[in-house]
Amino acid sequence: MDGQENEQRGTGDANARDRRERRWRPWRRTAGPADGSGRARRAGVVAAVLAVGLAGAVIGVLAGGRVNTDIGPFRAYLTLAPAIEGGTTVDIPPLGALQLDSHDGPTHLTVRLGALDQRRTEALIDDPASISRASQSAVEDVRNGAMRLGLRTVGSAVLVTLVLAALVFRNTRRTAWAGGVALAVTAGSLGLAAGTVRPQAIEEPRYEGLLVNAPAIVGDARRIANDYSRYSEQLQRLVGNVSQLYTTVSALPVYEPAPGTTRVLHVSDMHLNPTGWQLIRTVVDQFGINAVIDTGDITDWGSEPEASFVGSIGLLKKPYVYIRGNHDSARTAAAVARQPNAVVLSNSTVSVAGLTIAGIGDPRFTPDKETSPAGSGLTKQVADQVIGAGDQLATTVRNSPQPVNIALVHDPASAGPLSGTCPLVLAGHTHARQVSKLPQVSGKQPTQLMVEGSTGGAGLRGLEGEKPTPLSMTVLYFDQQKMLQAYDDITVGGTGQSQVNLERHVIKEPAKGAQVPVTPTPTRGGPESASPTPTR
């Protein structure tokens, strides 16, 4: 019996050893026909490790290949994604995108420009020299952002792969091999992209969306950049010269504003020129302005990033009455409305500084419109739109419980229906000053139309010609009866012109029989050249 028990115990020990060897040595197999199945199993394991490694790398890149960074005054959002061909997309919502053939390799970079940082933007506005510094640092900003993005992408790909492999294999060695595959694939792809970078690709972009119009709208980017550099240098001196305006005013004996005079500053067509804000602040402070009126086109495209441009309104600390221009979107108007002391008129009235003001925004939104040649007219359809806005505002003015002192329209073509409803209509749009009388309606008071130039010098467009568009604005003086008594036209020269001009005009009743200039106004349903005002 003892021998039989010993034999059974020995057999059990051998079986246990066999089981332990099979458990801890999965790669060991007996010789013979089993070798083929072992190799197939090893090949399957290798394929599974590669598949998990690749899948984890792709998921990790999609999940973690993104980073926020600052590029100049912009907040930018950088993302990496697997792709068949390399390249870069610069996304500028809602204007469109630039496609750059920037590199090779299976990775695609997207740079999405977000909102402007108000603090950094104001720093650029206050110090013209910082514009050149910002352009130089932008390249470094992009490089730093790309490095952070690369490290974050590699880390995310490896981490996701390790988690995925641990769940699939439940084996430390296979998990480590899958993580190594993900590291090699991700780092190799990014290394290939970095090694094949083509900086000159920025010179040959492919435009998409509204940006297809950019070359026609902006013109030669190099020439404009050079002009703006000179422009910035001159403007620092130009704005300082505005301090001499009071000296000029004191030398004008023709009109002395009486006590109780209300001073209103009329601005229009800023078109994103930050220097316009410097000039406005100087005039507001030195002329004792009671309120500012803006007849539209404060932006160029009405996009979300541009909305931060209106943040300077609150710094004026004066009532700011605004109507939307054809380059301003509803989003732009909403951004203005959020500013302290700002009022947006949309076929409505408001009382500011003792004046009752009515206004209506431009019925069009045409951010991709170029400035048409002077003298071109409105089509019948557009003329009906523009005149219709004037008709709506005229009805609002007539129904106002308080007599309206000033009516605001963006395009002077809208002013015709307002004749006889109020003494003064202010407009912009044409980038050229004009003062005239609207055709008088029998039995009604005469109405004066004052069209402002461009307070922003027409933005970048103003730098395209040989003679850049000057910055212009007008100070209006109203007596205690809220009637216009005088106005000062202020003009600041463009590039290479350092003069500041002020012209004083006193309102006088025309002598009997004198010819008063009358503004031709379009009629609904007229010919295509119904309006002499250019479309912008």
Image (cartoon, rainbow, N blue to C red):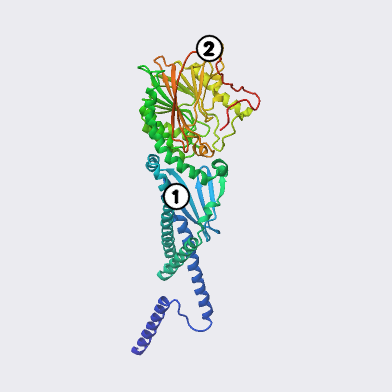
**Residue 185: % across, % down:** 48, 65
Q: Is residue 338 shown to the viewer in this render?
A: no
Q: Nearer the viewer, residue 29 or 269?
A: 269
Q: Quadrant of the N terminus?
A: bottom left
Spot occupied by residue 347 in the image (x, y as percentages of width and height) = 49, 24
Residue 23 drawn at (x, y percent): 41, 76
Say if 116 sits above or below 415 in the image. Answer: below
Tag nearer the camera, 2 or 1: 2
The residue that label 1 is drawn on is: 77
> In the picture, residue 316 is in which quadrant?
top left
- Dividing the picture into quadrants, the one containing residue 257 is top left
Residue extending farthest front? 251
Type of amino acid under label 2: Lys
Q: Which mark is residue 9?
A: none
Residue beneath the point at 54% across and 45% down: 220
| Residue occupying the point 38% across, 24% down | 290
Q: CA distance from mark 2 to mark 1?
A: 58 Å
What residue is pinned by disc 2?
444
> Relative to the observer, which residue lies in front, 164 or 421?
421
Residue farthest toward the right in the current orientation of the protein: 527
The amino acid marked with disc number 1 is Tyr
x 39%, y 44%: residue: 129
Label 2: state its secondary structure: loop
Q: Does 242 appear above or below 232?
A: above
- Residue 51 placement (x, y as % from top left): 50, 65
Q: Earlier in the sequence, mark 2 or mark 1?
A: 1
Secondary structure at badge 1 equals: strand
Circle 1 crowding by C-alpha within 10 Å: few under 14, some 14–19, many from 20: some
Residue occupying the far left of the picture? 2
Mark 2 crowd level (few <14, some 14–19, many ≥20, 10 Å Cα): few
Q: Residue at x 59, y 33 (%)?
A: 373
**Considering depth in this image, is 104 or 49 the residue closer to the camera?**
104
